[in-house]
Structure formats: structure tokens, C-alpha cells
Image (cartoon, grey):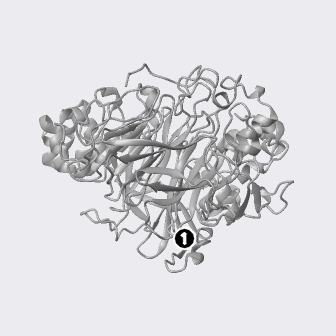
Amino acid sequence: MSHTPESTRSAWSTRVDGDDDVALNRSTAPSFDALLAARLAQVGTPAGLAATTALGGAGAAVVAASLFSGKTLSRRGLMKGAAASAALAAGAGAVGTALAPASARAAESASTLTFPPLPHGYDETSHVADGYEIQTLIRWGDPVVAGAPDFDPLKQSAAAQAQQFGYNNDFVAFMPLPVGSDNSDHGLLCVNHEYTNPHLMFPGIGDGEIDKLTKDQVDIEMAAHGHAVIEIRRDGTTWRVVPDSPLNRRFTALSTDFAITGPAAGSDRLKTSADATGTKVIGTVNNCAGGKTPWGTILFAEENFHGYFMGDVEQTAEAENYKRLGVGGGRYAWGKFHDRFDVEKEPNEANRFGWMVEYDPYDPNSVPKKRTTLGRFKHEGATTVVNKDGHVVVYAGDDQRFEYVYRFVTAGTFNPDDRAANMDLLDEGTLSVARFNDDGTLDWLPLVFGQGPLTPDNGFNDQGDVMIDVRKAADLLGATPMDRPEDVEPNPVNGVIYALMTNNTKRKDDQLNAVNTRAANRHGHVVEIIPPGTAADGDGANADHAADTFTWDIFLMAGDPSKPEDGARYGGDVGPDGWLSCPDNVAFDSKGRIWIATDGGPKSGIADGVWAADVSGPGRALTRRFYACPRGAELCGPEFTPDDSAYFAAVQHPADEKDSTFDNPSTRWPDFDDSLPPRPAVQVIVKTGGGAIG
């Protein structure tokens, strides 16, 4: 793999994400100096302060990180200035090891991972570690439903696209067949289609030239958004799509009916000229990540919905709400041809997006439901765990700079013996937002109408208003602004929640807080959120996910450890190819090891891809590269089969680089056919000769 200089997208792109300089949270945060002083005061001795000063540079950074970890540094450890890294590892427990400067420690050889590391690089195709094989399973335009036409890039239509695999595959879930089984050879693959790149979909269109798009092309874009369900089967060592399965289906932004449920359903603020009830809506957009429920349904997110709406929000009664979310000034041309995407013509339509959707993949007639109990914001995804008391807990992140981490706890309990009894479990419960404290604790702050500032005096007239204006409610409660929270996912083995902060280059020195300690954080970091009851031996069975107070820790600080300005921290020396940038999505294998997918590596001259690491023991936070994307692409939707024998990787927006277009792309991955454009695709990775991945 050849290296390339830093690669960036063009200045204007239809990609709409948390990097947009709109509607930033203006909440104030205590300065880093103040937080550091507070934590040092808890150490409690002048000797400790002197030792911290003596460490200087990287050593002081490690002290700061360890102080913010919630674990106490010993006085003896602080005094060992010359051996700062080792002392911190001993005095701060696991986090001291995780955050030791990579250059200060010998390379660990005790990782439980056995695959050889894949080198960094950047080229036109995808790569996987030696000993593994890649199969392309399904690509943009491939038939999904029975009777769908074959893909013809020069003869596209909305009707055809609505039956074909959509664009920019993101979240991937493998749901075994039959329902309730752990079959790893046959199942349903449920895949999001987040957004479109018209300059890579259609000839003659440059990046940002939405004014050139025709109504037919806009309708194709709308049909290429949404979600797909495809039945897949493994024959020997080869995976294939079952083309005529009655379970195969598509959801689109153009024509699929969605129900709206929960406290905001029926609100006057959700009523439109097309729906006087405020309980149903056509379509879904910007479907990023998602999750699976214990009863076998799928959750998928509506993330950066704001960019689909045109018009002047000041002309609506929702101006404050829309400005907080960045609605208006759309980056798509949909409002030119569909009035509902123009806020001046349909002022409430944008309130009907920004939710989590639930549906049953095993029932092809199930109606997808937008669950308003989970709040309206730029959802990255939503992941679930059954608490020890039977309540179901959902974790989620709001993917924009300075936004928040959320938790939802159901009012009812999960019934493992009656699947149907759980189907509306997510319609009642309590949504809370996280406040990360500088002493290493975390408080969950309930977002409940009538409690604290969530009253009519502040514009909230019922629980529906709180859910529609969740960001405003979280601001008022004093939640902690984060560095773009993406996946927030519980590890099924140890019970710890891993929250991925992808980056925040806008954070300034006076906006630092206990859990976001780098100004201009271009590489991101991974936070551990630890429920009470989590066992020291890594058993999460007794973790209390419904408790009011947790603790938190830092798992890693991404970046290049050879560059002091990056402030990178791993579990040790990860070598020249083990470091990563911009953690985005995450999966866990059956051993509880973390597999991190990235979005932003090309800005550092490396391809995005997948890195894996142990979460405990000598291999903790020693990341190792497993998979690399083709140029211009990011890696989404990491997912394993139940037996870890197959790993699904969704490669999104290949060739999305400056001056790369349908007519002249920087790669024609995955087909490498001059008659075909680059095509987002889902690949499946297997071990040569079979066996568990890792």
C-alpha cells in the first residue's frame, strides 16, 4: 500500500455530518486548569503537586489523564518523576497503563489477538490482514427485492433504485435465521443507507452542484436513502444473497410509510398538511448507525437530518428549535421538488425527523416506528442491554461537536418468553443525559417534563416538547458537551459502555472539561462508562445500567504517538501502524475485544479501516490494524456473526475526494470496471480455512 499526502474532500460536499459549523452548543465549561487543580487538590499533598510539576511535558499529561480517570494516584507514584509512566501505571490501575505514552513503554506481546498487523497506507482498494479473505457481498444498485432490475448507472430510475441496494451503506446488523437462534450461516443482513453523493452517482455533476440535479435524479437520491433487509446464506466458505427471499425489503425517503409513537406523537408541532394527526410520516433520512434489541428488532438512526431542509427558519414558529439543530440552508435539492423539505412551505416537517426507528426484520409487513421516547437529535445510533432487573437500557450519542451522551431506561421489563409482549417496550421510560464530573463519576440527569427547569417557563408544555427539544433540555440541565459522540455501546462481556468521540477541532482551551482534555481534538478518543456492579474480573452480569451514578475512564486517546502535538495515548507501543484517528463505530467479539471502525484517517494520510484491541490485561488498548478501506472511503457497520467466523464491513463513499467524480473517480472500487462508477458495498471477511476471527 502506497502512502499519499493528506487527502481532503472538496470544500462543499453533500456529506452532512458533525463537522458542519452550524448550531454549535454554546454551553460554557470549566477550564482545564481549573479541573486539573481540583483533581490535584484531591491528591492532597504538596509533595504530590511538586511531583506533578517535576514530571513536565508528557508526564504531566499522563498525570492529568489519570487524575481525570477517577482512580487515585498514590503519593509514592507521584514522586517518581523520572519513572513517571511506570509509576502512573502502578498507581492509577488500568487507566495508567492505557494512557502511558506509547514511546515510553516497550511493545507489549501479550495481546490475545493473533492476526498480523496490517500496515498503514492509502490506495485504490481494500485490504485485510494476512490469513484472512475478503468477499464483496452486495453493492449499490444490486437487486434486493424479487424482480428488481440489474444496475445500469446510465439508466437509473427512482422506481428501480427503490428495489435495489441503496447508497452509502452504514450500520450493519446480522440477524440469525430462524428468529431466536444463534445460526451463523444463515440470517438477515439489515443495512442503513445514510446519504448520497450525487457527483459520484451521476455523470456531469460536480461536488456541490445540486442546482444541476433534475427531479428524476433527486427522486433517485431519495430512493437510495433508508434501509435494506437482505437474506444471506453461507455455502461452504462463500456468502451469497438470497435474491427472491420474501423477507427482503427496502425502506426509502421517497415512499415508505413510518408511524410516530411515544410522547411527541400527535403533537401540534408534528402536524403537517399531509398529516393532520402528527402520527405518520413518509420516509427517513441520514440513517447512520443503529442497534439490535433483545427481542430481535432493529433500531436505526436519523442523524444529520438538518441538511435536507431548505428555507428561512426565521419564517417559522420553530426558529429557535431549528437553529439549535442547524435546520435550513439545505445541502440537498429536495426542497426544490418536494415542498415538505422547504420549511417555509411545510414548517413542521423537520420535527418529524431526527428520531430512532424500530422495526421487525422478521416480519416483512411490519410498520417502522419512530420512537419519540428516545429523543430528537442527531442520533449516531442506539444500543441496548437488558439490566439485571429486567429493564432494557438504551445508550446513544448525539453526533455533533459539543453535544451529549444519552441513556434511556424502559418503564417495563423484558419478557424473554413472549416476543410480542416487548414490541412496544420502547414507548415508555425515562431518557437521561450524562454529566461527566471531574472526580471520575458520571450522573444521569432525567429529561422529564415538570422537573427542574423543564417547565412552561422555559418553553416546555409537555413531555412531547421535551423530546422534540432534547438539546435545549440537556443544555438547561448542565450536561457535559462532548467531542462528537458517535457509537455508545455496551460490551456484552464486561458490561462497560464504550463511547467513541470522533473529533472536535473547534474545542478551545477554555472549553476543556474532565473527559474532553484536548483542544482542537482532531483525532478523537474513546471513553469507558462504567456502571456500578461491574466486576473487577471483567464480568458484567451484575452491572446496574439503571443506576443514577456511574464512573468513567479514558480507554485511549487517538492520534500518532510519534507526534507529541497529537497527545496520543494507547496501552503501550502500538508501532507505526497501530495508531488510529477518528474512532466512529464499534463492535465487540464474543471475547469482549473491541473492534473500532474509523472515519477521518485520510486527513492524516492513512486509509480508514478497522483496529482491534483487548479491553483488559496486558493487551489493553494496544490497537492493531485489521482492515483498510479504499481511498476516499470510511468504514462503517462493523458486525460479527454469533460465532465470530464472519465479519461484515460496510465501505461508504469510496472515491469521495477532491476533484473525484462519476466521470473521473479516484478509484472504481469494488468492480474496477471502466463502465461502472465507484460503488459503496458491504464486504464480509472470513479467516482462510475457517475459524473465529481475531
Taking depth in this image into account, of 450 and 610 the one nearest to the observer is 610
Q: Is residue 431 above or below residue 594?
A: below
Q: Is residue 313 left or right of residue 387?
A: right
Q: Secondary structure at mark 1?
A: strand
Residue 33 placement (x, y as % from top left): 36, 38
Residue 213 placement (x, y as % from top left): 77, 30
Farthest residue in the front direction? 236
What's under tag 1, amino acid-wise?
Answer: Thr
Evaluate whether residue 396 shows in this view.
no
Q: Residue at x 63, y 39 (%)?
A: 23
Taking depth in this image into account, of 168 and 22 the one nearest to the observer is 168
Q: Is residue 596 above or below residue 125?
A: below
Q: Is residue 31 left or right of residue 22?
A: left
Q: Residue at x 78, y 43 (%)?
A: 341
Tell me the quarter of the image containing the N terminus: top left
Q: Quadrant of residue 52?
A: top left
Q: Is residue 550 left or right of residue 356?
A: left
Residue 42 placement (x, y as % from top left): 27, 51
Q: Is residue 368 above or below residue 62?
A: below
Count of number-bearing discs? 1
Q: Residues within 10 Å of mark 1 (few under 14, many from 20)?
A: many
Residue 562 placement (x, y as % from top left): 28, 27
Residue holding disc 1:
410
Q: Quadrant of residue 83?
A: top left
Taking depth in this image into account, of 148 and 450 the one nearest to the observer is 148
Evaluate whether residue 556 shows in this view.
yes
Q: Residue at x 17, y 38 (%)?
A: 84
